[in-house]
């Protein structure tokens, strides 16, 4: 079964850190781009960053540069999002998604993991 499953969310104080994990099954990371997205209550889903099938890093948000880092472990077929210096405005449901290399749309989505940052 082709799927991705996120984990690692929770409640953290401002300034703290969390590491989210996205475990992929039914496909391999070396043929897919993997992206992280988030959606806060009442807001649209927004793209955070991605790691391409060949290891390139794509950042979309200026607000997370220097604080969030994406990485992957091909042996575990898992992608990570290390989040440091968290702010209350980072509170959201975080989603992992995958797309086949050279395609445009992400078409494999997880259920999301909740991140709450308290002030």
Image (cartoon, rainbow, N blue to C red):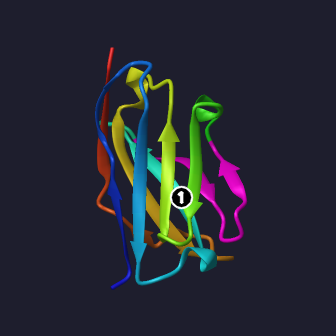
* Residue 14 in picture, x, y percent from top left: 39, 19
Q: Residues within 10 Å of mark 1 (few under 14, many from 20)?
A: many
Task: Assess whether residue 58 is covered by the magenta stretch.
Answer: yes
Look at 66% across and 71% down and name the residue there: 53
Determine whether the residue tagged by mark 1 lies in a helix, strand or loop: strand
* Residue 100 in picture, x, y percent from top left: 58, 78
Magenta-tinted stretch:
44-60
Q: Is residue 107 left or right of residue 66?
A: left
Q: Is residue 18 left or right of residue 104?
A: left
Look at 41% across and 60% down and name the residue there: 22
Res. 92 visible in picture: yes
Image quadrant where residue 63 sits: top right
Residue placed under numbered mark 1 in the picture? 35
Q: Is residue 110 left or right of residue 31?
A: left
Q: Residue furthest front?
A: 75
In the image, residue 99 sits, relative to residue 20, either above or below, namely below
* Residue 105 in picture, x, y percent from top left: 55, 70
Look at 53% across and 72% down and name the residue there: 75
């Amino acid at each position: 079964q082709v799927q991705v499953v996120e984990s690692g969310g929770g409640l953290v104080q401002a300034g703290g850190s969390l590491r989210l994990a996205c475990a992929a099954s039914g496909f391999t990371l070396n043929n897919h781009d993997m992206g992280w997205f988030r959606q806060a209550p009442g807001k649209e889903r927004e793209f955070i960053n991605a790691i391409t099938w060949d290891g390139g890093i794509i950042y979309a948000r200026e607000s997370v540069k220097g604080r969030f880092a994406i990485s992957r472990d091909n042996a575990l077929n898992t992608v990570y999002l290390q989040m440091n210096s968290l702010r209350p405005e980072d509170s959201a449901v975080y989603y992992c998604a995958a797309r086949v290399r050279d395609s445009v749309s992400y078409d494999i989505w997880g259920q999301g993991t909740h991140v709450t940052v308290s002030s």
